[in-house]
Image (spheres, rainbow, N blue to C red):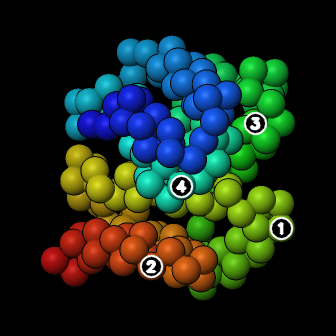
Amino acid sequence: MIRINEILDKTAIYLSEQEQALITKAYIFSAAAHAGQVRLSGEAYLSHPLEAAGILADMRLDAASIAAGLLHDTVEDTKATVTELRELFGDDVASLVDGVTKISQIRFESKAEAQAENIRKMILAMAEDIRVILVKLADRLHNMRTLEYQKPVKRAVIAQETMDIYSPLANRLGLHRIKTELEDLSFKYLKP
């Protein structure tokens, strides 16, 4: 599991101390919000937002994006609200978390619908802020890396959704390493 110090080391090269302080503040908030929660792997839930933030730091994204990576599940999975995040972290971070939360709540009925909806939502999200998609891709990538802990039926559903929606999104954005890893991880469960 990646640690906050490793993320701060990665970002020290290109972010200011004030920006790193925002990331640290987001980490502390996320740790408190997710306290006691556990992933299916048995790891502390905090490992997931840390890994997502680590992926974003590897992409050299800004402090707001990395903070949003740390906070991306707080509204959906804890008592935290977007209003609370806005008060503590500002409009930028709160809007990113809200955007990721909204994308996470989309449910697709069919592959054709998923493709059409994917394009529509991608355009809307990109018009608003491309970073929402980048945080969501980091979230999905880490979830795919730990997919083995899901039940077999859910693995297949998540892997297919990744192939139909998230891999093409990464491809359209020129994120070929992420696209390839998402496809490889999906094929592991769809076409072993």
User: Would you name the residue on which mark 4 appears?
Assistant: 60
Earlier along the polypeptide chain: callout 3 or callout 1? 3
- In terms of secondary structure, where does tag 3 sit? helix
Quarter of the image where the N terminus is located: top left
Per the model, the C-alpha gap separating discs 4 and 3 is: 20 Å
Find the distance from the CA under tag 4 to the CA under tag 1. 21 Å
Question: For this rendering, which residue is in front, 2 or 164?
Answer: 2
Location of the C terminus (image quadrant): bottom left
Mark 4–mark 3 contact, CB under 8 Å? no
Q: Which residue is mark 2?
A: 176
Q: Nearer the viewer, mark 4 or mark 1?
A: 4
Q: Is residue 48 above or below residue 85?
A: below
Q: Residue 70's spot in the image, x, y percent?
A: 53, 35
Q: In the image as oriented, which residue stretches furthest toward the left?
A: 192
Please give the name of the residue rendered at 59% of the width and 53% of the height, measured from the top-left corner: 61
Q: Position of residue 164 (x, y in %)?
A: 49, 78
Secondary structure at numbered mark 2: helix
Mark 3 to mark 2 CA distance (whole Å): 28 Å
Q: Nearer the viewer, mark 1 or mark 2?
A: 2
The mark that comes first in sequence, 2 or 4, is 4
Q: CA distance from mark 3 to mark 1?
A: 17 Å
Q: Which residue is mark 3?
A: 94
Give the residue type at disc 4: Arg
Residue 84 placement, left or right of 52: right
Q: How far is the residue under mark 1 from the one under mark 2?
A: 22 Å
Residue type at mark 2: give it.
His
Check contact, mark 2 vs mark 4: CB within 8 A: no
Frontmost of labels 4 and 3 is 4
The percent coordinates of residue 170 (x first, y second) are 53, 74
